[in-house]
Amino acid sequence: MSSCRSRRAGLLVMALIVATAGAPQSIVLAAESLPRPAGLEPDIGFWRKIFGEVSTNEALVHDNQYLGIVYEKMDLSAYPSDGARHRQMDAEKARYAGILTRLSGGDRTNLGPDERRVLALWAGRPGNASLRAAAGRVRVQQGLSDRFLEGFIRSGRWEEHIRDSLRQSGVPEDLAALPHVESSFNPEARSYVGAAGLWQFTAGTGRRFMRIDGAVDERRDPYRSSEAAARLLKANYGELNTWPLAITAYNHGTGGMRRAIRAVGTDNIETIVRNYDGPAFGFASRNFYVSFLAAEEVERNAEKFFGPVRRDAPERLTTIELPAYVSASSLEQTLGLPRETLQTYNPSLLPAIWLGKKYVPRGYTLRLPDSVSDAEAGSRLADIPGGERRSAQLNDPGTRTHKVRSGETLSGIAARYGTSPTRLASLNRLSKHNLIRVGQVLKLPGGAEATGADSVPRQESGSQTYVVRRGDNLAIIAKRTGVSQGRLMAINSLDNPNRIYPGQRLRLAGSSEGG
């Protein structure tokens, strides 16, 4: 177990200033401990069993509202296929729904053993209406303890970086356990709705905090996605002011949590979990906070649940920023590393890179095994012939058009592709920026403008905002706009000049004072 686990669970540092060499200072948010309401302990206990005791060869048949009501622990080992397992789980669900329906009829004489056992799970003498409602709430949850253990072992590779990222963003370090709930610490995890990576970012949310385009998807990078998750959690807390709600918002969104607060009249997490019945507040959202608390508890007490465990050692890497656009084959030859190694250490680089349809972007932080030193990597990259150093991204014919979808605006489309609404309007002969329609196919700028990395953005006359382009940094933006870095940081509440992302809209004027 890591030595940092000696701290009391949920204890948060108040107003601690964290300083790292060469990095800006950040202040840890003052916050309360992560509360464990007594009324939610049965729910936490349920997930503690799922994560720490019940394997994927087992399942619990339970009430989906009162998780302390568990009707049966199923053995699924005799069913080798997922289809067979799900059919058996459905059959058991139907069986218990039938038992509860019969009990709700009111005749409780001459009960069979299963009926007596089920009735005894409900305290006192439950009414017929309560049992009838319970018949509609029977659910089956497959266990996850073996997957949790695998994830716990893997997590050793990134825990140090995750905790550093959380601490630098002012987020409680206990939230380092959140990927247990999201992905079992599998960086290749992908959900049916398209969420990806360790932290299960959707593309829409991910673009707020990291780079996602035709060449790079940082959701697949455990390091960059962890930094992004820390910033998202900080933003959630800034809007909701309690960690239980901020954590739940990671699944349900801050807008959804504000609706929950309005509906029940309080920000108390227990009241929301028990009483809020919003249309999108389903089982996963309702249980997100309690499952996180259970995951953190199981992780903290891993030896109790799993016995002695040796976690993977922290990854030791060499990182270097690319000074130009470079093909994967050039990197392979220059660095003397097999392509498979480059792919393993740089999972955010998409197939288009390895197929030669895109260059590795300028400014990309290349990760290498630490057998290659910083100096050695820099020296080798310096030897790349000038003819193989590109000033612009390689064009991909498949990305030169965009089909307008419902809710999209020209400015939003422009930000996505690193160009300006004016450029898009001119290229597509639009008389007005707002005259686009669903289904319309827009031409996109080619060459450097397609990526926005080498184009020189022109600030529209009188504009009070600036859309961040790929390749931008705050110094470049300050020079282009005539607004100092200090003032840009103050106006936009930036705590780190390196934490800007393509598509982000920066204000150039405001009431805040700055340099």
Image: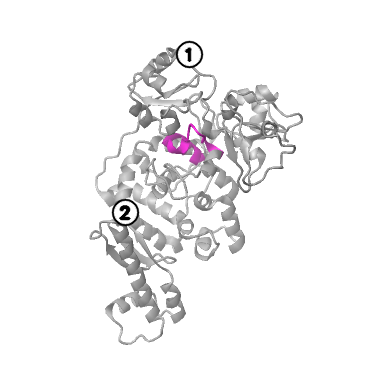
Question: Does the rendering let one see residue 493?
Answer: no
Q: Which quadrant of the view contains residue 48?
A: bottom left
Q: Nearer the viewer, mark 1 or mark 2?
A: 1
The residue where tag 1 is placed is 387
Q: Main secondary structure of the magenta part?
A: helix
Identify the image quadrant of the N terminus.
top left
Task: Give the magenta-colored segment's residue range.
Answer: 208-230
Q: Is residue 394 left or right of residue 329?
A: right
User: Image height check: is 118 above or below 405?
Assistant: below
Q: CA distance from mark 1 to mark 2?
A: 56 Å
Amino acid type indicated by mark 2: Gly
Q: Nearer the viewer, residue 269 or 375?
A: 375
The residue where tag 2 is placed is 52
Q: Is residue 446 left or right of residue 513?
A: left
Q: Which quadrant of the view contains residue 471?
A: top right
Q: Residue 257: where, in percent of width, then height? A: 56, 55
Q: Residue 51: where, in percent of width, then height? A: 34, 53
Contact flag, marks 1 and 2 (Cβ < 8 Å): no
Q: Is residue 226 left or right of residue 98?
A: right
Q: Is residue 457 magenta?
A: no
Q: How is the image coloured?
A: one colour
User: Image height check: is 72 above or below 127?
Assistant: above
Q: Which quadrant of the view contains residue 84?
A: bottom left
Whichever of labels 1 and 2 marks the residue nearer the N terminus, that label is: 2
Considering the numbered disc 2 on the image, is that residue within a helix, a strand or a loop?
Answer: helix
Q: Nearer the viewer, residue 163 or 413?
A: 413
Residue drawn at x 24%, y 45% is 308
Q: Is residue 215 magenta?
A: yes
Q: Tell me the crowding category of disc 2: few under 14, some 14 to 19, or many 20 or more residues within 10 angstroms, Cα based.
A: many
Q: Residue 86: where, in percent of width, then height? A: 33, 61
